[in-house]
Amino acid sequence: MVNRQTPFVLYGGDYNPDQWDEVTLEKDIEYFKKAHINTVTLPVFSWAKLEPKEGIYDFDWLDRILERLWVNRIYVILSTPTSAQPAWMSNKYPEVLPVDIKGRKRTHGMRVFFCVNSVKYRERARAIAGAMGKRYANFPGLVAWHVANEYGTFCYCENCQQKFRGWLQNRYKSINELNERWHTNFWGKNLYNFDEVMLPTELNDDYRFNPSVQLDYMRFVTDSTIDCYTNEAEILRGYSLDKTIFTNISGFIKKLNQFKMVEYMDFAGWDNYPSPSDPPSFPAMKHDIMRGAKAGKSYIVAEQSPNQQNWQPYNKLKRPGQLRTIAYQGLAHGGDTCLYFQMRQSIAGQEKFHGAFISHSGRDDTRIFRELSKLGSELEKLGDVFLDGRTDSQVGFLFDWENWWALELTSGPTKDMDYLTQVHSYYKAFHTQNISMDMLKLKYDLSSYKVIVAPLLYMEHQDIAEKVKVFVKNGGTFIATYMTGIADENDRCVFGAYPGKYREVFGIYVEETDALRVGETNALVLQDGFLDAKDGYVGHFLCDLIKTEGAEVLATYGEDFYKGVPCITCNTYGKGKAYYFGTQPDDQFLEDFVGQLSCTIGLHGSIKCEKGVEVTYRTNAKGTVYFVINHMDEKRKVQFGNAVYQDLLMDQKWTKDVLLNPRDVLVLKRL
Ligand code: GLA
Ligand code: ZN
């Protein structure tokens, strides 16, 4: 549990009362109570106020706020304010300011605008984290420590360059090994000592960075950021042995290896800001990635928007009921908190138009306030019924951050390479049928799954191919795609035909790969017995020209000079099967394919319902809780059959067919 003293969903979020007076604070507290808010996060960006001069702290104002909150039994997640250093620090120690990829030394102004390797930054950050730890570790309302906010600075300063050289030396030991790994014979980039290594900036490369160098630089920035985090987390731990310590990961930041970062955190925590155009399966997948980050452990939803954002191109209002479906989706996939940015709207600054519980109007009779209060009362009623709950899945997806980087750093075969989007297309096919999935790190055990899907597993590392072989041999079903098994962890391609180490398990090799422009397709000609040999499916994006070495051909291309060449194959390997998709099939194909696969190998959703309704479940010591979420603007049928379910929000039971209202949610236990 995030905190044993608070066995309920933490409900509330970022609160910045240092922006207004004490009368407003009292009004806020009154509203918090009305909205059933139990937890706020602060003081996220208040370093300049807490440390007006180097080493001189002013905690009095924060003490007063904390006291008022606690008197009213509002808990706090205390954040260290270290994502926005004070101006005096940037001026006195310019080394804390970052240098950007264009080589520009930035000046003071932004937040999350510091060099993660700056010794001064780390020293001052540790000092204030320590001062806060000492002062507040025993504060009775303290729920957890939240370190900094949304790390993500990439710095290219001299200091980072030095550090990068040291990091490489440590990783590769000799310059010869580095030359080998980076294949520096290409374009005459041979190095004779580590001091010759340059950071990959636009000063030395204007259009095509060497992906091997970039990959290591991204690994290095992740490690430097982790050091920044642990620099503070360690000192806080010294004061708070039993409190959760974490940081919030920005929406979905590719640049930092979040799977690695969360290993240093007690809980994974992330900020969920779905774009208005995202289908519900997209945030669902991201939630599952966060649950996967710590092998199925529940996670912290640290931020969501209580209404529209201000930073989307078009900031759509949340439709009536949408706040509720988004919030429950987070809980349904493994979240134990429902936190928002922000409690009260700022009167000025970059985010003055960002949604909040309390808007500029200062009223509590707004649509949003009403919806949030209702949600708060529901969560209060649910108590701890699903907290710590886990979800057993029969399907696992291999997901890998370094693979993501390498795929998208690669020049060719298409400029449209987008790992998240491609993975999502497969995820969606299972999600629509409410088949639960776990997102897996490469190092996890695969043996409990019936199906493993590994879209675009371009990079072969951690001997994953060997694990996959064992999985299939023992009876598992493995599904992979074009762009599989091509490069090693330094982005050096395999010799001996793709998909490299997976050739044997798939019983194929790929001779060539064609790239299709957006809108271009190639017909899929299905062989007899495969999905009723239906017409009309197409492939797009990339087309592998496959040669079989034992695999059965399920589909061939219908057009172009490679008409008749295999594009989808299945190989029986040991007791299992390995499917290879040489092209990106359309959504309908994927849905039909997953439908058939589910029948053959017995995958099933828990509660039947019409499309557009999401069903998930979480099991803890108290039993299993089901979440049924209608994401649609229309009513949708849910079929309980003869089973009877207790509604945990309303004192009511459900059985047989039920029509769920638009954007309605049920939280249930089976009787
Ligand atoms: C991020 C930040 C918050 C706020 C929100 C706005 O997630 O962590 O401080 O800026 O975005 O959506
Ligand atoms: Zn730097």
Image (cartoon, helix red, strand yellow):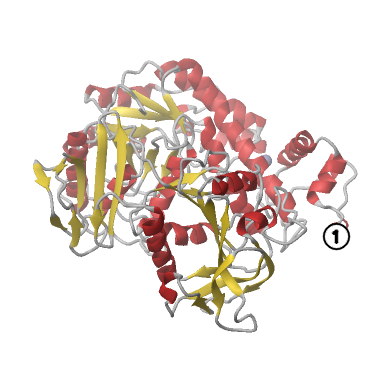
Q: Which is more toward the observer, 545 or 380?
A: 545
Quadrant of the image containing the N terminus = top left
Q: Residue 645 in the image: x percent, y percent? A: 16, 44
Q: Residue at x 50, y 44 (%)?
A: 440
Asked whether mark 1 and ligand 2 are closer than 8 Å, the reply comes as no
Residue 177 placed where, x, y %?
Answer: 83, 42
Q: Position of residue 602 (x, y in %)?
A: 37, 52
The residue at the point 49 percent across, 21 percent down is: 236
Residue at 63 percent of width and 33 percent of height = 92
List x then y, in percent, for residue 451: 47, 51
On the rendered structure, is 97 left or right of 519? right
The outermost residue toward the front is: 575
Q: Secondary structure at mark 1?
A: helix
Q: Amino acid at mark 1?
A: Trp
Q: Quadrant of the C terminus?
A: top left
- Mark 1 highlights which residue? 187
Nearer to me, 296 or 450: 450
416 to the left or right of 638: right
In which quadrant of the rendered view does residue 364 lie?
top left
Q: Mark 1 Cα within 10 Å, few/some/many (few <14, many 20+)?
A: few
Figure quadrant, ligand 2: top right
Seen as rendered, the residue at the extreme right is: 192
Vertical relation: 583 (above or below) 114: below
Q: Is residue 401 visible?
A: yes
The image shows a total of numbered marks equal to 1
Q: In the figure, 128 relative to 530: above or below? A: above
The single residue placed furthest to the bottom in the displayed view is 560
Q: Is residue 156 visible?
A: no
Along the line of sight, the residue nearer the viewer: 280 or 40 = 280
Which quadrant holds residue 158? top right
**Residue 546 vertical position relative to residue 245 in the rendered view, above or below:** below
